[in-house]
């Protein structure tokens, strides 16, 4: 009996959050690394479905970096990254679009639908969702000056047209977005999936942006997880070397979304089963939240 009562208390802990978030929008970035494990795929799909059932407008943006790497390797195409962005020539772009829209997107839609949800896949080309210009990537050279390097068809999202997402919401679907955008001349662009999630969250005035990653969150220099960071403290954490490497673009993407009106951003370990539910519906959460 006691165990049953404990189950009820878990649900009761979730009640204030359900009440607060029902009717609001949550954008979730699902990274390529979190797709490797069958159990995790299922728990991700079930979390998303549950959010939708309690009336949260749930939007998924997926990555697929590891899957792109694998296919490029099979084709004998060498790939490199500049500040976390894949250098994308025309040939690479072809593979990126094929893998993201033709393979990974279909798989993510499949997991959700097989587990009882109603997902519909699209890319940033559908309904002109993500209009891009070429990203001008600035890097610091050894003498300290900055120079712009050409990294090919990597998109800087300059316009988001969320009408197609609103149409899917009206129909009760969960949109699943592949991070490929379109240029004014119809050309395809490869976009970092975290960036897409941040831009979409901003355009939808989302309550939350959740980035599922393969690390536990932002850690202090002593290695302790920082469960909550005020937006104003982020620049200092980057300056003093607490936030480093691949975490910098993730955190920046969260701060950009918050500056654009998103209420909270979370960086959460996607390797934990039911990471999304644990972060949203429990009092402490499991990752790092950044709030305005
Ligand atoms: C990424 C798009 C996929 C992605 C890439 O080509 O890998 C750029 O780097 P993850 O799984 O989130 O890393 N695009 C421009 O972001 O996937």
Image: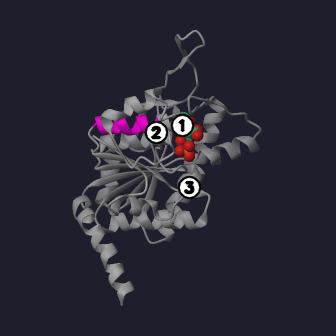
Q: Where does the image place residue 57, in percent across and percent down from the top left?
A: 31, 57
Work out whether 117 lies above or below 96.
below
Mark 3 to mark 1 CA distance (whole Å)? 16 Å
Q: Check if mark 2's residue and mark 3's residue have beta carbons within 8 Å.
A: no
Q: Say which quarter of the image contains residue 260.
A: top left
For label 1, the SS is: loop
Q: Earlier in the sequence, mark 3 or mark 1?
A: 3
Residue 160 visible to an observer of this rendering: no
Q: How many marks?
A: 3
Q: Where does the image place residue 164, in percent across and percent down from the top left?
A: 35, 48
- The residue singled out by tag 2 in the image is 250
Q: Residue visible at 56% across and 33% down?
A: 84
For label 2, the SS is: helix
Q: Check if mark 1's residue and mark 2's residue have beta carbons within 8 Å.
A: yes
Disc ID at residue 34 = 3
Q: Earlier in the sequence, mark 2 or mark 3?
A: 3
Q: Residues within 10 Å of mark 2 (few under 14, many from 20)?
A: many
Q: Where does the image place residue 168, in percent across and percent down from the top left?
A: 34, 56
Residue 233 visible to an observer of this rendering: yes
Magenta-colored span: 249-260
Q: Is residue 230 magenta?
A: no
Mark 1 to mark 2 CA distance (whole Å)? 7 Å
Q: Where does the image place residue 108, in percent across and percent down from the top left?
A: 52, 58
Secondary structure mostly seen in magenta is: helix
Q: Say which quarter of the image contains residue 251.
A: top left
Q: Residue visible at 26% across and 39% down?
A: 261
- Decide if residue 195 is on the left or right side of residue 208: right
Disc ID at residue 111 = none
Q: Nearer the viewer, residue 254 or 38?
A: 254
Q: Residue visible at 49% across and 42% down?
A: 193
- The residue singled out by tag 1 in the image is 246
Q: Is residue 254 magenta?
A: yes
């Amino acid at each position: 009996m006691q165990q049953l009562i404990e189950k009820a208390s878990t649900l009761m802990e979730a009640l204030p959050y359900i009440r607060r978030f029902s009717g609001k929008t949550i954008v979730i970035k699902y990274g390529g690394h979190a797709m490797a494990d069958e159990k995790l795929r299922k728990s991700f799909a079930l979390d998303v479905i549950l959010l939708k059932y309690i009336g949260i407008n749930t939007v998924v943006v997926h990555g697929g970096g590891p899957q792109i790497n694998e296919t490029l390797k099979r084709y004998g195409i060498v790939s490199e990254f500049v500040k976390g962005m894949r250098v994308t020539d025309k040939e690479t772009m072809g593979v990126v679009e094929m893998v993201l829209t033709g393979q990974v997107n279909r798989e993510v839609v499949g997991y959700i639908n097989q587990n009882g949800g109603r997902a519909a896949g699209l890319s940033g080309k559908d309904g002109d969702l993500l209009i891009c210009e070429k990203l001008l990537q600035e890097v610091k050279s050894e003498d300290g000056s900055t120079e712009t390097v050409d990294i090919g068809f990597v998109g800087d999202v300059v316009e988001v047209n969320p009408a197609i997402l609103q149409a899917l919401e009206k129909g009760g679907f969960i949109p699943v977005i592949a991070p490929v955008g379109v240029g004014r001349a119809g050309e395809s662009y490869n976009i970092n999936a975290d960036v897409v999630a941040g831009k979409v969250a901003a355009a939808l005035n989302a309550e939350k942006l959740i980035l599922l990653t393969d690390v536990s969150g932002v850690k202090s220099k002593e290695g302790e997880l920082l469960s909550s960071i005020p937006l104003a403290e982020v620049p200092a954490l980057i300056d003093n070397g607490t936030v480093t490497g691949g975490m910098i673009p993730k955190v920046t993407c969260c701060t950009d979304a918050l500056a654009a009106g998103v209420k909270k951003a979370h960086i959460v370990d996607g390797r934990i089963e039911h990471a999304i539910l644990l972060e949203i519906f429990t009092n402490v959460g499991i990752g790092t939240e950044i709030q305005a």
